[in-house]
């Protein structure tokens, strides 16, 4: 997993290569760890109160991760949790069986519909050649020795003559006219006349039957599709609830930590709950540097989704793309609006508080229960494009859950492609293939320019001309980082200490 905070600090920290194009600074002294051992219930109350306090202070708060581990020694809590988890699993399994059957029916109906839709197209466009081919392959062949395919031994051109008859005399049944027009024997003309009558009768019946079946199939397809959507909506909350019961041992870091954790003991009744929360709000600049662009209230003065974070962080294998390989520019553009709603268009800079909360409930053999909690807090000073990256990370985590649910259900995601759209996509691919050569030429030029920039360090040399603050030692340290400490971090520390009864 790529640590996105490390990536941001590498680019926009105090010694960052691109400070000015992006800012992501963890101020010194604003990363304390608090450990409180409190009576049962008090630590939980402190945590809930702390989240409420952050909201009242103007922070926007999002939970980004949570794990739960319960020792089997704590039989009451363990049994309750496991029973609930098993009930959810049972509901999911039963639902999946129903979904699988419905999806199977839907796929079969789609196959039939595509076939009849093709037949209907032949009829509506009066594609005589294709209709006659269907008649030969699907209808006439069932007449056995009297089929045209069996007669080619005696009349090698009979099938070609039948097809030619459709082009030049599609409704003609007169033997003499057929014989004269196609220059064939009267014996063959008699056979073709008979086949022509059979074909015309079949075509008339086939047309109305195809329309009727297409209408029925559309109704059945809509019914199955609606059923699948309903199953999906019914199961989504259940799968999401089950996913919340994520055990720490599911992650490699959790399995490794189990070996060294002071609470992980098979002989002790302990349950641990780990939660990570991000809270952020804009920070007001005390003194804007000369040339700073003041953002209007109704729109971003500087676009947070800029080319720098696109190339270096979002679509880089060392950035978000490394954690979420499915990320595309189309998806980012789709969720961009919802991300910007969590930001303030009037501000370029933000303070973000990253909190890792670990709660251990210990039950002693005498029945006494206590709560031991650890708050790992770390403040960050961010430019708006750095915050955009982190909010995009949150949105990607939410999308991961949606994709996980869809995979469990065996369905495509919202960005997936129903099979009836496949023909459109193939057509689009063919059109895009024509533009591929042009794009490759421009891509080669871009790679050459990037290679020149990296060789001579031009990108780094010009980074000071980025839209954000780049004077770390003077302006960022003395103006912004002081504010993140005094105005934002100190109140957090005071609240936690006072809430735990530790004092100043």
Image (cartoon, rainbow, N blue to C red):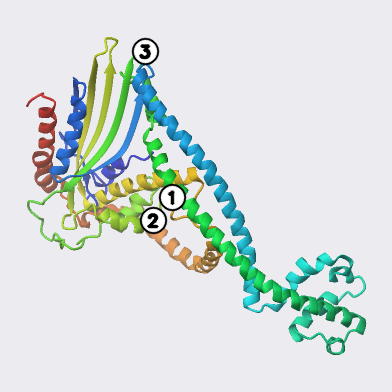
At which x and y percent is residue 428?
A: 51, 66
| Residue 331 disc label | 2
The CA distance from mark 2 to mark 1 is: 9 Å
Residue occupying image coordinates x 28% and y 53%: 339
266 relative to 306 in the view: left or right: right
Would you call the spot at circle 2 few (<14 residues within 10 Å), some (14-19), or many (20 or more)?
Answer: few
Task: Say whether disc 2 or disc 1 marks the residue closer to the N-terminus.
Answer: 1
| Residue 267 disc label | 3
| Residue 70, visible in the rendered structure | yes
Q: Report if the CB atoms under discs 3 and 1 are less than 8 Å apart.
A: no
Asked whether 323 or 24 is in front, the reply is 323
Q: Report if the CB atoms under discs 2 and 1 are less than 8 Å apart.
A: yes
- Kindly state the secondary structure of the residue where label 3 is placed: loop
Asked whether 206 or 294 is in front, the reply is 206
Would you call the spot at circle 3 few (<14 residues within 10 Å), some (14-19), or many (20 or more)?
Answer: few
Residue occupying image coordinates x 45% and y 50%: 230
The CA distance from mark 3 to mark 2 is: 48 Å
> For the residues carrying marks 3 and 2, which lies nearer the camera in this image?
3
């Amino acid at each position: 997993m790529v640590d996105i905070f490390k990536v941001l600090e590498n680019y926009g920290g105090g010694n960052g290569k691109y400070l000015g194009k992006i800012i992501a600074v963890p101020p010194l002294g604003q990363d304390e760890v608090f450990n409180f051992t409190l009576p049962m219930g008090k630590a939980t109350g402190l945590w809930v109160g702390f989240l409420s306090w952050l909201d009242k202070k103007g922070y926007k708060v999002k939970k980004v991760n949570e794990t739960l581990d319960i020792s089997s020694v704590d039989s009451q809590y363990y049994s309750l949790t496991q029973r609930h988890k098993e009930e959810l699993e049972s509901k999911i399994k039963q639902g999946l069986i129903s979904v699988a059957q419905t999806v199977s029916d839907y796929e079969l109906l789609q196959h039939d519909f595509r076939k009849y839709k093709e037949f209907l197209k032949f009829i509506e466009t009066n594609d005589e050649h294709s209709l006659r081919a269907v008649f030969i392959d699907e209808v006439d062949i069932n007449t056995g020795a009297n089929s045209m395919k069996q007669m080619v031994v005696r009349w090698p051109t009979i099938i070609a003559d039948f097809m030619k008859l459709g082009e030049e005399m599609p409704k003609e049944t007169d033997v003499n006219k057929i014989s004269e027009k196609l220059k064939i024997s009267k014996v063959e003309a008699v056979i073709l006349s008979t086949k022509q009558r059979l074909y015309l009768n079949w075509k008339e019946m086939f047309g109305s039957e195809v329309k009727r079946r297409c209408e029925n199939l559309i109704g059945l397809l809509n019914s199955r599709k609606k059923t699948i959507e309903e199953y999906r909506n019914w199961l989504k909350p259940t799968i999401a609830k089950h996913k919340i019961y994520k055990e720490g041992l599911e992650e490699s870091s959790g399995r490794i930590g189990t070996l060294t954790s002071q609470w992980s003991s098979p002989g002790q009744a302990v349950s641990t709950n780990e939660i990570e929360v991000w809270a952020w709000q804009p920070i007001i600049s005390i003194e804007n540097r000369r040339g700073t662009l003041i953002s209007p209230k109704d729109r971003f003065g500087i676009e947070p989704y800029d080319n720098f974070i696109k190339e270096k962080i979002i679509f880089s294998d060392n950035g978000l793309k490394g954690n979420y390989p499915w990320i595309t520019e189309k998806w980012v553009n789709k969720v961009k609006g919802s991300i910007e709603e969590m930001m303030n268009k009037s501000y370029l800079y933000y303070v973000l508080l990253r909190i890792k909360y670990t709660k251990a409930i210990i039950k002693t053999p005498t029945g006494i229960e206590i709560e031991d909690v650890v708050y790992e807090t770390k403040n960050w000073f961010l430019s708006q494009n750095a915050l955009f990256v982190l909010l995009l990370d949150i949105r990607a985590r939410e999308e991961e859950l949606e994709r996980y649910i869809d995979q469990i259900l065996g369905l495509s995601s919202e960005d997936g492609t129903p099979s009836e759209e496949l023909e459109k996509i193939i057509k689009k691919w063919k059109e895009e293939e024509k533009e591929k050569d042009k794009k490759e030429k421009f891509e080669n030029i871009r790679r050459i320019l990037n290679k020149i920039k990296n060789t001579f360090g031009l990108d780094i040399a010009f980074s000071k001309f980025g839209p954000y603050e780049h004077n770390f030692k003077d302006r960022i340290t003395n103006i912004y980082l002081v504010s993140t400490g005094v105005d934002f971090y100190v109140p957090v520390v005071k609240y936690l200490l006072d809430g735990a009864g530790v004092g100043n």
